[in-house]
């Protein structure tokens, strides 16, 4: 039942005002003693030429709505208290019948949405900072799919650029093949750093690197082979992390994929007459957007990161005719994306307005900002393994007799890291502290996972519960609050899409878990004489477990049946 709509219809009949407009005015009060829905009458004061509190009083005495138990008028607001019994029946039965689909919808209407995420640079460590794009993007991918969009996940690998010329020079001179087999990225990083040290002494190495990159761009066999090897060994490491996280992509078309698609974009820009020379380089000026020019080609004729992004956006538009093209990339690249989107606009591409940069802050571990240059970074794989082993320790403490401890520890360990990344507004910097993330009583994955497992164990103990539930008996505040929250899953999903913000789902799941625990502490379930009340409560437990499971899966986090 769409309560908002029913209220709006009744209000619209009485006031003669437009239904949609009224629906937009209806609010959900911050506290439940102010009702379940509220209508601010001062919105009508002007057209009705009356004081808001008078309007509220009048409406209160004339409105008579079936699903509403009581209406109060307070300070110009009409507060509606909906009839609980019917509401609970409707909500709980809907959740149980829709199961893993509960919360989903079809507003996406199968439209193509690209989510670009993760996008690490080949031959560079996959550090804890990379999890932001990876986890946020993976979650947005799932959230959008759940809302009916046809979602395409792209890992725009950083596998092209002049640094590969340098790596080739370094590879030929200093690589230790054995080390490359064992710890590829560590070895690639070592020789990359060595290149910079050596080039300081011998600048001709830079020219050599440029020549190698040129050969790579021209498709010379030797360079292509070395580049491919560097890419392959890097991907082995990256894939280990993706497997741990259970993350997949529909496409790995990274920067190299566009190496042969840049020429046509550059000539299109030229044809439009917007390519200008500046200090030997070629740029598109973006004064009208109040931002610095977008560099298209360096003075030595090499294309750059931005050129590849222009080619990528154009290719994606042609290939997918996207409704939205979303880039999940750190906020430090805001200017870059602003330049790309503005250049596309200047080229006359209307679809540039459908490109979205979804930014995020930086990660700190133990208050230290992560360095990315020298290699003293915290590897994501190490962080995840540590989280898994700490989870295992906790399980050994709390429940040593548990079956498949390793599997449970993995789900908790990985889940708690992802949860931490998705808990707060994405633009906020993240500081990562072990004592918070694995706290079973905090706002954490283990807390929510534990709540789920608690629900599951109640249901297991209950065994068969096929008798009829009487939902009119669910009339404690705790039951009603939980049910109301459960009913808001889909509207929460839509809000998280509007803001490109998985944390809205995370907070929602925390709220559901908290409301469930209040209900659990306040209302007995198993020791009830009244079977029809017991059934109603058990079904509320079923509905809660479904919502937690569906919600966590939108974040890319697993549940466990016992822990
Ligand atoms: N590889 C880049 C980096 O690590 C991120 C790529 C972002 N995506 C893009 N289309 N430019 O900084």
Image (spheres, grey):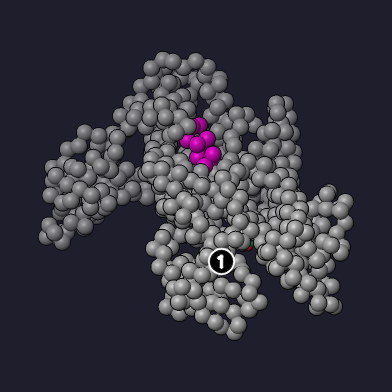
Which span is picked out in magenta?
545-554
Q: Measuring 85% from the left and 78% from the top, which residue is drawn there?
A: 201
What is the x, y in percent for residue 134? 60, 51
Find the residue positioned furthest to the bottom. Answer: 279
The quadrant in which the N terminus is found is top left
Work out which quarter of the rendered image holds the C terminus and state it. Answer: top right
548 vs 411, left or right, is left
**What percent of the width, then of the height, locates residue 110?**
41, 43
Quarter holding ligand 1: bottom right
Front residue of 172/492: it is 172
Asked if residue 408 shows in the view, the reply is: yes
Rendered position, 21 above or below 223:
above
Mark 1 beta carbon near ligand 1 (under 8 Å) = no
| Label 1 sits on residue | 263
Q: Position of residue 489 (x, y in %)?
A: 42, 40
Does 212 appear in magenta? no
Q: Is disc 1 placed on a helix, strand or loop?
A: helix
Is 552 magenta? The answer is yes
Can you tell which quarter of the image residue 218 is in? bottom right
Which is nearer the eye, 410 or 304?
304
Picture coordinates of residue 391, whole percent (x, y): 70, 40
User: Considering only vertical position in the picture, is 480 above or below 208?
Assistant: above
Q: Could you tell me which residue is drawn at 54 percent across and 59 percent down?
A: 312
| Residue shown at the point (78%, 72%) measured from the top left | 208
Q: Residue at x 42, y 29 (%)?
A: 98
Principal secondary structure, stretch drawn in magenta: helix
């Amino acid at each position: 039942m769409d309560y908002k709509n029913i209220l709006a219809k009744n209000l619209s009949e009485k006031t003669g005002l437009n239904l949609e407009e009224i629906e937009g005015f209806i609010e959900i009060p911050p506290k439940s003693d102010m009702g379940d829905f509220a209508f601010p009458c001062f919105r009508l004061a002007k057209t009705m030429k009356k004081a808001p509190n008078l309007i509220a009083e009048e409406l209160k005495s004339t409105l008579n709505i079936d699903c509403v138990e009581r209406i109060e008028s307070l300070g110009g607001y009409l507060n509606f208290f909906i009839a609980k019994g019917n509401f609970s029946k409707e909500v709980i039965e809907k959740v149980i019948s829709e199961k893993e689909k509960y919360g989903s919808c079809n507003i996406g209407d199968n439209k193509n949405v690209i989510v670009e995420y993760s996008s690490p640079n080949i031959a560079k460590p996959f550090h804890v900072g990379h999890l932001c794009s990876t986890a946020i993007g993976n979650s947005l991918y799932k959230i959008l799919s759940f809302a009916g969009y046809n979602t395409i996940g792209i890992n725009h690998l950083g596998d092209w650029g002049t640094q590969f010329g340098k790596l080739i020079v370094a590879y030929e001179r200093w690589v230790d093949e054995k080390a490359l087999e064992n710890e590829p990225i560590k070895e690639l990083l070592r020789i990359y750093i060595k290149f910079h040290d050596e080039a300081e002494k011998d600048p001709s190495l830079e020219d050599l690197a440029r020549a190698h990159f040129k050969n790579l761009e021209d498709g010379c066999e030797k360079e292509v082979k070395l580049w491919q090897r560097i890419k392959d060994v890097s991907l082995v490491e990256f894939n280990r992390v993706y497997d741990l996280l259970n993350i997949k992509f529909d496409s790995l078309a990274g920067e190299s994929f566009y190496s042969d698609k840049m020429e046509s974009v550059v000539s299109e820009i030229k044809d439009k007459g917007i390519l200008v020379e500046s200090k030997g380089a070629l740029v598109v000026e973006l004064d009208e957007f109040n931002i610095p020019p977008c560099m298209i080609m360096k003075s030595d004729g090499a294309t750059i990161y931005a050129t590849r992004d222009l080619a990528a956006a154009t290719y994606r538009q042609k290939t997918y005719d996207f409704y939205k093209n979303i880039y999940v990339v750190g906020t430090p690249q805001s200017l870059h994306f602003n330049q790309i989107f503005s250049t596309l606009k200047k080229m006359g591409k209307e679809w540039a307005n459908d490109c979205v940069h979804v930014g995020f802050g930086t990660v700190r571990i133990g208050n230290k900002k992560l360095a990315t240059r020298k290699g003293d970074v915290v590897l994501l794989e190490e962080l995840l393994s540590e989280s898994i082993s700490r989870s295992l320790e906790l399980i050994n403490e709390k429940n040593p007799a548990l079956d498949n401890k390793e599997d449970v520890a993995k789900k908790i360990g990985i889940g708690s890291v992802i949860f931490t990344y998705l808990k707060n507004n994405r633009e906020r910097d993240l500081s990562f502290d072990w004592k918070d993330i694995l706290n079973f009583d905090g706002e954490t994955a283990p807390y929510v996972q534990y709540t789920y497992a608690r629900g599951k164990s109640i249901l297991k103990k209950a065994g068969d519960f096929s008798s009829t539930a009487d939902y009119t008996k669910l009339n404690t505040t705790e039951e009603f609050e939980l049910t109301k929250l459960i009913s808001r899953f889909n509207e929460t999903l839509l809000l998280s899409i509007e803001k490109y913000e998985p944390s809205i789902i995370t907070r929602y799941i925390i709220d559901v878990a908290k409301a469930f625990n209040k209900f659990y502490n306040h209302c007995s379930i198993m020791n009830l004489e009244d079977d029809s009340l017991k059934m109603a409560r058990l079904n509320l437990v079923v509905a809660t477990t479904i919502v937690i499971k569906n919600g966590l899966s939108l974040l890319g986090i697993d549940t466990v049946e016992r822990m």
